[in-house]
């Protein structure tokens, strides 16, 4: 019985020791959109929030843009699966397979969903001269002006 307890304790200690080695290098959060945008801002806030719990780890935000976010996503899909390269993307991940037929990765199998970290409201904004002041008025105005607007 003592031997089992010692073995179990050593096993648990090995997990703790392994956990303490992460991160063993810089953590990269890949954002497949331009710097300065809303996803970039969230990534930088996320990196800051992760630093302290990870013992002051170095965390960088890497903006790898292009092709509807597939270039940055591919970078993460091809990275070593060691937890040091993560992707911060939005709904583009769900729409990519329908928009880009020849992607070099598979959304369904090359990524693991970790969780939702943010909700981003979308707003509809126009110039002040538009006669519509809300969405209902906008739809009515569009219906009245078919063929005249783009």
Image: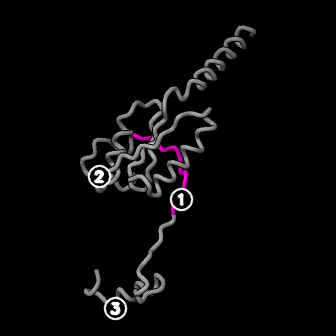
Q: Is residue 148 above or below residue 64?
A: below
Colour approach in the figure:
one colour
Relative depth, front residue between 58 and 12:
58
Q: Which residue is at a point 47% across and 71% down the rendered structure image?
A: 123
Do the CB atoms of the residues marked 1 and 3 lie less than 8 Å apart? no
The residue at which mark 1 appears reads as: 119
Query: Are there few (<14), some (14-19), or many (20+) residues within 10 Å of tag 1?
Result: few
Q: Which residue is mark 3?
A: 144
Please name the predominant secondary structure of the magenta segment in the image: loop
Please provide the residue range marked out in magenta: 110-120
Q: Quadrant of residue 75?
A: top left
The reply, left or right, for residue 68 in relation to residue 87 is left
- How many C-alpha atoms fall within 10 Å of the one at disc 3: few (<14), some, or many (≥20)? few
Q: Secondary structure at mark 1?
A: loop
**Residue in the image at 72% along x and 14% along y:** 5
Query: Are there few (<14), some (14-19), or many (20+) residues within 10 Å of tag 2?
Result: few
x and y percentages locating residue 45 in the rendered image: 55, 49
Which residue occupies 67% across, 12% down? 7
* 119 drawn magenta: yes
Q: Residue at label 2?
A: 67
Q: Mark 2–mark 3 contact, CB under 8 Å?
A: no
Q: At which x and y percent is residue 42?
A: 51, 52
- For marks 2 and 1, the one nearer the N-term is 2
- The CA distance from mark 1 to mark 3 is 34 Å
Question: The N terminus appears in which quarter of the rendering?
Answer: top right
């Amino acid at each position: 019985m003592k031997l089992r307890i010692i073995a179990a304790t050593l096993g648990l200690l090995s997990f703790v020791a392994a956990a303490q080695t992460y991160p063993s290098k810089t953590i990269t959060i890949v954002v497949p959109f331009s710097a300065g945008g809303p996803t970039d801002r969230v990534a930088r806030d996320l990196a800051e929030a992760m630093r302290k719990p990870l013992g002051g780890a170095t965390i960088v935000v890497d903006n790898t843009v292009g092709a509807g976010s597939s270039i940055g996503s591919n970078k993460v899909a091809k990275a070593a699966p060691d937890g040091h390269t993560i992707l911060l993307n939005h709904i583009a991940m769900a729409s990519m397979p329908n928009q880009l037929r020849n992607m070099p990765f598979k959304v369904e199998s090359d990524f693991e969903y970790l969780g939702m970290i943010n909700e981003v409201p979308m707003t509809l904004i126009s110039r002040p001269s538009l006669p519509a002041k809300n969405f209902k008025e906008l739809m009515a105005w569009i219906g009245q002006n078919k063929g005249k607007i783009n």
